[in-house]
Amino acid sequence: MSARLPLWGLAAGILGLVVQWIAEPAKFNPFPPGIVFIAVFGALTVFTARRWWGPIFAVLISLWIVFGGLAAGQLTPNLTSSNAGTVGGTVVMSLGLLFAAGAGIMAILVAWRARGRRGTT
């Protein structure tokens, strides 16, 4: 499994935030900060791509935004909004980030197992 796969999920997360921003620009002043967080953690994922644990950054930011957003009560209002752009953007963001987390976990496990088969510690 490629360590690039989680990056596609992070890109979908950013796309979802951009859709939300276009739908309700007043909600974000001046722009969604999640874009910066996802981009930074994506860059960390790229910079550590040669390490078996590199995708952990994609996993962490994805789970923090989705489950942290649910726990803080910020994700649910977006999903029940009367603005279709907000709902659609939130769905795209959430699905992309959940994909990034799952793909990142799988990439870590595959790389870790391959590392063990090579006999390196």
Image (tube, helix red, strand yellow):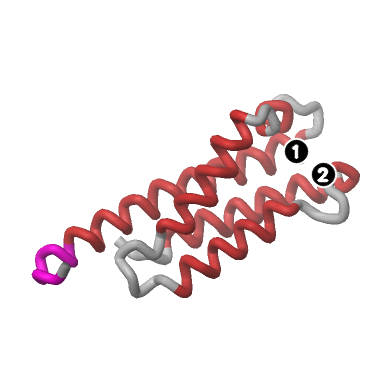
Residue 67, x across and y down, in percent: 54, 35
- For the image shown, how many numbered marks are present on the structure? 2
Residue 55, x across and y down, in percent: 41, 60
The answer to whether residue 116 is left or right of residue 8 is left
> Does label 2 or label 1 sit earlier along the sequence?
2
The answer to whether residue 26 is left or right of residue 105 is right
- Type of amino acid under label 2: Ala
Q: Residues within 10 Å of mark 1 (few under 14, many from 20)?
A: many
Where disc 2 sits, the SS reads: helix
> In terms of depth relative to the viewer, which is nearer, 4 or 66?
66
Residue 93, x across and y down, in percent: 61, 45
Q: Which residue is mark 1?
A: 86
If the image is split into quadrants, where does the N terminus sit?
Answer: bottom left
Residue 63 inside the magenta-drawn segment: no
The answer to whether residue 67 is left or right of residue 117 is right
Q: Which residue is mark 2?
A: 23
Residue drawn at x 48%, y 43% is: 98
Residue drawn at x 73%, y 27% is: 77
Distance, label 2 to label 1, CA atoms, is: 6 Å
Residue drawn at x 57%, y 39% is: 66
> In terms of depth relative to the viewer, which is nearer, 4 or 54?
54
Label 1 near label 2: C-beta < 8 Å?
yes
Residue 119 falls in which quadrant of the image? bottom left
Where disc 1 sits, the SS reads: helix
Q: Is residue 27 above or below residue 34?
A: above
Q: Is residue 119 above or below residue 69?
A: below
- Type of amino acid under label 1: Thr
Residue drawn at x 23%, y 60% is: 112
Q: Which residues are magenta?
A: 114-120
